[in-house]
Amino acid sequence: MSERKDKHEFNASRFNLSVWAVKHRAIVVFLMLASLLGGLYSFQHLGRQEDPNFNPVIMTAVVAWPGATTEEVQDQVLNRLEQALQELHGVDAVRSFARQGYGGLTLVMQGGKSGAELDEAWYQARKKVNDLRHQLPSGVQGPFFNDEYADVYTALFALQAPDLSVQELNDYSSLIKKQIQGVRQVGTVEVFGKQAEQIEVSLSRARLAAGGLTPPHMCGAGAEQ
């Protein structure tokens, strides 16, 4: 009998959340309302983006050397560039490939860097390569860098105007590009499919024959003779 009584007293001394909630209803209701209002406020101020921000840690560079062999591109150009880029702080890897007449580099930085830190790294990479340009063989073109792997195209607009000339359509596309670039938070705007203006000349063979001319004369071949 004494053991059951001691056990009952021990259980009664333990904290019971249900009993406490029943005895303190006002506090429970206040906490519930506070949690609800806090959740609504947090939801209204929750950041929402269609495309999340991310910072690629990769930059590529391409060089062209017309007429050079694969070994010349690798030994005289890419190896020098690799050695310079490996001196950068926070470099994870530098990979290269060489082909006849051209080659390329891929610079990979260590992860966990912010956008500002990566921008500084790309600036330093360009600076080191520019300091090395005068040591590259004559005829080398580049390097041409690309670090804009974070650009994401979210909208594509097509222009069609049968009544306008090619040049007028190009002018309108350039005007639209300029206006879109003024929109807040727009990063890059590019125009695809631009066509060069062409002039077509149609010759009447009958009129040329009446004047004693042939198509080669109109192209300048007759003048050379």
Image (cartoon, rainbow, N blue to C red):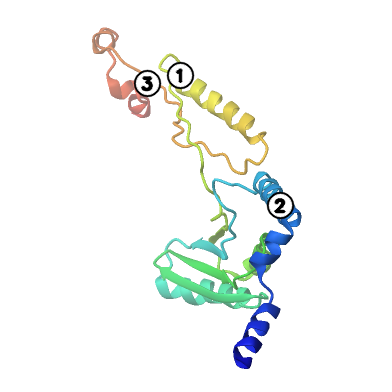
Looking at the picture, tell me which residue is in the foreground, 61 or 223.
Answer: 61
The answer to whether residue 215 is above or below residue 13 is above
Residue that badge 2 annotates: 29
Residue that badge 1 annotates: 165
Rendering coords of residue 11 (x, y %): 64, 81
Residue at the spot 51% in from the left edge and 62% down from the top edge: 63
Look at label 1 and name its amino acid.
Answer: Ser
Residue that badge 3 annotates: 200
Residue at the spot 58% in from the left edge and 47% down from the top edge: 49
| For the residues bearing labels 3 and 1, Cβ distance under 8 angstroms | no
Residue at the spot 71% in from the left edge and 56% down from the top edge: 28
C-alpha separation, residue under disc 1 versus residue under disc 2: 72 Å
The quadrant of the rendering that contains the C terminus is top left
C-alpha separation, residue under disc 3 versus residue under disc 1: 13 Å
Give the SS element for disc 3.
Answer: loop
Give the SS element for disc 2.
Answer: helix
Instruction: Give the mark nearer the N terminus: 3 vs 1.
Output: 1
Look at label 3 and name its amino acid.
Answer: Glu
Q: Is residue 23 visible?
A: yes
Q: Is residue 120 visible?
A: no
The answer to whether residue 165 is above or below residue 124 is above
The quadrant of the rendering that contains the N terminus is bottom right
Instruction: Give the mark nearer the N terminus: 1 vs 2.
Output: 2
| For the residues bearing labels 3 and 2, Cβ distance under 8 angstroms | no
Residue at the spot 62% in from the left edge and 44% down from the top edge: 187
Query: Outermost residue toward the front?
Result: 1
Look at label 2 and name its amino acid.
Answer: Val
Rendering coords of residue 162 (x, y %): 40, 17
